[in-house]
Amino acid sequence: MIQLPKGTKDILPDEMYKWKYFYRKIEEICRSYRIEEIKTPVFEYTELFQRGVGETTDVVQKEMYTFDDKGGRSITLRPEGTAGVARSYIENGMGSKPGPIKLYYAMQMYRYENVQKGRYREFNQLGIEYLNTQAPSADVEIINVATKILDSLKITDVIVEINSIGCPVCRKKYQEILKSFFKNNLENYCETCQNRFEKNPMRILDCKEEKCKKLNETAPSILDYLCEECREHFEKVKSGLNELNIKYVINPKIVRGLDYYTKTVFEIISKKDGFAVLAGGRYDGLIEEIGGAKTACIGFAAGIERILSLIDEENLNIEENIPELYIATIGEEAENIATKIVSSLREKNIICEKDISGRSLKAQFKYADKIKAKYCITIGEEEIRNKVAKIKLMSTGEEETVGLSVEDIISKLS
Ligand code: ATP
Ligand code: MG
């Protein structure tokens, strides 16, 4: 049998209701902030990610699905959403619209990862991007949206971690100091970190290897080297979060390590398993990097699978596709009547079913039970003659008489 590719998964109907619930919440919340949805292509020219995600990142160096198409162009399945959104922003002239442009997306991403729990090769991200806004209040609002989404899903066992990584001006000095700190001990860091030393030293702070983490404990903090503007920006972000009563901790080890990432960076971590549910930050230099005008932006991406794994269903009122009514039938005439009734009820968005498998009456009852139908009506010869039937509340077995008209039936469903 052919199996699904490693790192991918099917999302089956018995899990889909959770995804739908999530999407409904997102739509609701985003509408209230006037954040509009965007979709970009699954594949882009490879160069977009090389420039937009950065040559020195793990994503570009190790994780991309890249191939030449039949026309000989290098194509990459998107490993993240921001680069495509930034390209679309430039290409569609969104910069000339009244800013900020507030966008969200929920799309599949592709990364050639070491597959493990919470880490797939095809996964879904919710991303929110605010483009063309440089004020600290945009940072506050975007962190506020992130916490609101988790709150609405009753995911509360999380920590918001924030940091500022300054701007290319103040970072230059910090990077020199950081490099001289690493230099003394470089041979004790992992190989990946040793490679990062020249090209992307700040990334070393983000290493997940225990021995590197230990060495990093005494590393100098970027927060001691911020320039006046970046310091002030960070202060305003913090006080904005305080105003909104959003709890956070400052973690100077959160970095992005690319030139076009600036100022605020943040992550929301699940306390339960230590995973980052969501990560984001300012990228004031990205649009310019990929060919647009200088445009200040901030955004985040959340792993939808990771969010859904934290949902406690008991705590949420997630609707399943439970049918309101099942109509059991005996004979062809009864079936015709049932067909008419269910089609009228469906017009009114009432979830209902009737037999379409030619089952015996007993098997129909069994099926109604299995699909957890709330009510069941049985139609046979006698019911047809008298134009009334019994409607049974399945949970108690209680029965009532109902006329075989759509209006009567609706009045009994509650
Ligand atoms: P990590 O350090 O865990 O590899 P990352 O820095 O690569 O994370 P981002 O690119 O910032 O992650 O992506 C944002 C979010 O997307 C992550 O916080 C996580 O929730 C989710 N995510 C990233 N990679 C995967 C994956 N392979 N499978 C499932 N979710 C993922
Ligand atoms: Mg990763």
Image: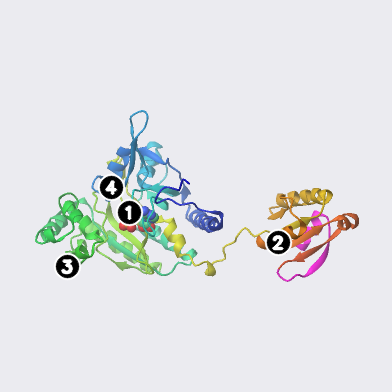
Q: Is 351 a magenta residue?
A: no
Which of the marked residues, 1 or 4, is nearer the chain's N terminus?
4
Residue drawn at 30 percent across, 44 percent down: 52
The answer to whether any part of residue 63 appears in the image is yes
Q: CA distance from mark 3 to mark 2?
A: 66 Å
Residue 56 lies, in percent from the top left, at: 23, 47
Determine which of the numbered discs, if any, sits on residue 62 in the image: 4
Determine which of the numbered discs, if any, sits on residue 114 in the image: 1
Q: CA distance from mark 2 to mark 4?
A: 53 Å
Residue 231 lies, in percent from the top left, at: 24, 61
Task: Please tell me how crowded label 1 is: few (under 14), some (14-19), or many (20+) other residues with Cα within 10 Å.
Answer: few
Q: Residue furthest top?
A: 71
Depth order, front residue of 378/109: 378
Left/right of residue 353 with respect to residue 150 in the rendered view: right
Provide the residue designation for mark 2: 366
The answer to whether any part of residue 281 appears in the image is no
Left/right of residue 181 with respect to residue 120 in the rendered view: left
Q: Quadrant of residue 92?
A: top left
Numbered range of the magenta stretch: 395-414
Up/down of 134 relative to 96, above or below: below
Here the colouring is rainbow
Task: Please tell me how crowded label 3 is: few (under 14), some (14-19), or many (20+) other residues with Cα within 10 Å.
Answer: few
Provide the residue designation for mark 3: 218
Residue drawn at 32 percent across, 60 percent down: 266
Q: Disc 3 beta carbon < 8 A from ligand 1?
A: no
Which of the marked residues, 1 or 2, is nearer the chain's N terminus?
1
Q: Residue furthest right?
A: 385
Residue type indicated by callout 4 = Lys
Q: CA distance from mark 1 to mark 4?
A: 10 Å
Task: Please tell me how crowded label 4 is: few (under 14), some (14-19), or many (20+) other residues with Cα within 10 Å.
Answer: few
Residue type indicated by callout 1 = Asn
Q: Residue furthest left?
A: 184
